[in-house]
Amino acid sequence: MGDVWRDNSLGLDGSRVIDRRIYVDPAIYAAEQEQIFARTWQWVAHESELPEFGDYVTATIAGRPIVVSRGEEGRISAFFNTCTHRGALIAPHARGNSAGSFVCLYHAWCFDTEGKLTSAPIPAAYGDNLRKPCYDIPQVRCEIFAGAIFVCLDPAVEPLERFLGQSAPYIETFLGRHQALGRVRWVMEGNWKLWHENFRDNYHPMFTHAVIGANYQGVKIEGVNLDLSQGHSLLAFPSQGNPDQIKSSVRRLTGRPMAADVTVRARPTAGATLNHNIMAVFPNLDFQNSGDGVLQNVLQVVRPLSIDRSVVELVAFGEVGEPPAVRQARLDRCLDGQTAAGKISGDDNEAARRCFAGFGAVREVRWSNMDRGQEQGVQGGKNDEYSLRAFYSAYKEYMAGALAAGG
Amino acid sequence: MPKDESLVAGTANAFSMSDWARERAVTALINRAARLADEQRYLEWMDLFAEDGEYSAITHENLTYKGLRLFRDVGKAALHERVAFLMGLVQTPRGKTVHLVSNIEVEPGEDPDTAKATSNFIITRTGELEDTRLHAAGRYLDRFERQGEQWLFKERLVVVDSNLLPPAFTELL
Ligand code: FES
Ligand SMILES: [Fe+2]
C-alpha cells in the first residue's frame, strides 16, 4: 500500500505532493461532503452571537440546514432546520430570535428551542396518528469550547476537545473572554481547499502581497511553521519589518512622498516574540491573531457552494470589557487587510482564483509540490510547509477509499 | 447600537440662494468623486478630501449590528496609502467601474462652512474578458467642509448593502 499519492511525476514522497484532481473531480467533491464535512466538528457560531433566550443562528453543513438555538437556562442545542411535517425551514434567518417557539410558516406546527414538537393546529384530523416523539426534529451533536459552538453530523464523533487536540489551548486564548463583533462573507472563485491552504502557506505573503514584500526587504524572516497533528497547524512569527520600505513603495507608486506613518503591519523587530499567530483547524476553520498595532483577532470558515465556488465567512472578536478606545480601533481597522475588500486578503482571493483556473490543465499537469522544509519532525521555518502537509495527511485519512492512486 | 440613519432630516421646504449654491457645490463634488474613481485618477480623488478627511466602508449588516467596518482611512496619509494599494500594491486587477450616484439630498451642517448629504449609489464593474456585473449598491453618508471657495469631503461612510461580497472588492467605492 503506502501513500495514495506515492506514484507522482515529481519523484517525491506522497506526503509532499498534491494530486490536483482533488480540486476538480466531482466524485471526490461528493465524498468530501460525506467523509469530511459530515464527520468533522464544524464551527457555527460564538456564544456571544446568541446572548438571549430564543436567539438562534443557522448554517448549512454538508448540504444539511442546521439551527443552533439558545433555550431554557441558557442551554444551547442544535437540530436540523426542517419542519417534520413537510420540510420547510423553521428558522428562516441567518441570525434571529424564535421568542421561544419556532412556528413553521406553512401549517404552523410549533417547535420549542430544542426542536421538540409542541403543537400542531387542528390536531383532531390526525386521529391518534400524531405520535409526537417521531415529529421532534432530530438533534445534531453540539459542543462548546471557549465560547465557540461546534456541531457535528456524525453522532459517533469523538468529543470536541479531543478533536481540537493541540489547537485547543490556542482557541482558548483567542476566544475565551471574547465576544463577536460582526461577520463579513465573500465569494471565493475556486475549490474550498484553496482558501484553507492559503492560511497554512506562509511562503506566499512576501510575493503575493507587495506590501509585505516591501516590509520584509532586508529582514531575516523569523517564525515557525508547525504541524499540530490531527490536521491542525500553526504559524507563529514576530512583528518584523521595515516601514521605510513601505513608505518608499508608496512614493514610487504614487509619485508623492508619504506624509506620515504607514498603517499596515510594519513594525521594527522588538524582542521578537511570536505575537502573530495563524492557526488552521481541520478541515475549514482558521484563526488569525496579532497582538500589536491594531489588535486583530478574527476567525474564518470556508464552505463550498459547489466544487468551483466557495463562501468565506469571517468573524471578528474583541475582548470582553476592553477599553472603549481599543474596541473602537478594532471596529474601525481590524479588517483593513481582511475580506475581499482587504489590502491583503483581496490578493489571496485572486491567488485562489488563478490556481483554480490553472487546474484546467489537470490531465497534463497533475501534481502540485508541497515539499518545503527538509528537517524531520513537525516543525520548520515560517516559509516551510509542515502546516500544509498536516492538512493533507488528515485529509487522506478522512478520504480513505475515495482518492484514486497512481496513474 | 449603530442604526441605519440618513444624515439628512429631509424636512426643509424653502431654499435660499446660499442653500442652492451649497447644494450645487456639494453635488458637483459627489459627482466628481464618482468620475475620478471610474477614471482611476486616484490621486485626484484623494485630493477631494480634507487633510483630516476620512473614507470608510461598512456593510449594512454590520452598520445595524456592532459597527464593524470593512476599513476606515482617517487622514491624508491613510488615504495616500490606499491610493498606493490601488496603484499597484495589490495584485487584484483593477476593473472598469461605473459609479452611478443618485437621490442626493444635501443639508447644511452645524455652521455655514459645513454640509452633509445622503445619496444612493450603484457601482458596476467590468473585469478582463468579463461581462459587466453589479459590484455594489448602497448609500453614501457624507460630511463636507468648505475651505475658502472649495468644498471638500470631511467624512465619507460607504454603506454596502450586499451580505455576500464579490470576490474582487478592492475598487474604490
Ligand atoms: S411544513 Fe411545517 S407545518 Fe407544514
Ligand atoms: Fe496571503
Image: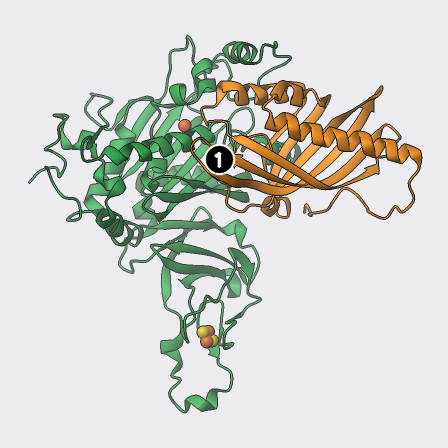
Q: Quadrant of residue A154?
A: bottom left
The percent coordinates of residue A334 (x first, y second) are 55, 32
Residue found at x 28% / y 53%: A158
Q: Is residue A148 above or below residue A92?
A: above
Is residue A320 visible to us here?
no
Label 1 belongs to which residue? A340
- Chain B on-screen colour: orange
The percent coordinates of residue A81 (x first, y second) are 43, 64
Question: How many numbered discs, if any?
Answer: 1
Chain identity for the colour green used in the image? A
Disc 1 crowd, CA 10 A, few/some/many (<14, 14-19, 20+): many
Chain label for disc 1? A
The residue most toward the left is A1
Q: Is residue A319 left or right of residue A189?
A: right
The percent coordinates of residue A26 (x first, y second) are 25, 48
Front residue of B26 and A22: B26
The kind of residue tagged 1 is: Ala
Residue found at x 61% / y 47%: B65
Is residue B46 visible to us here?
yes
Q: Quadrant of residue A131?
A: bottom left
Front residue of B34 and A338: B34
The percent coordinates of residue A354 (x first, y second) are 35, 31
Q: Is residue B129 left or right of residue A230?
A: right
Q: Is residue B34 above or below residue A309?
A: above
Asked which secondary structure carries label 1, the reply is loop
Q: Is residue A33 left or right of residue A173?
A: left
Image quarter (top left, top right, bottom left or bottom right) of the C terminus of chain B: top right
Residue found at x 53% / y 21%: B85
Q: Quadrant of residue B119?
A: top right
Residue found at x 53% / y 70%: A101
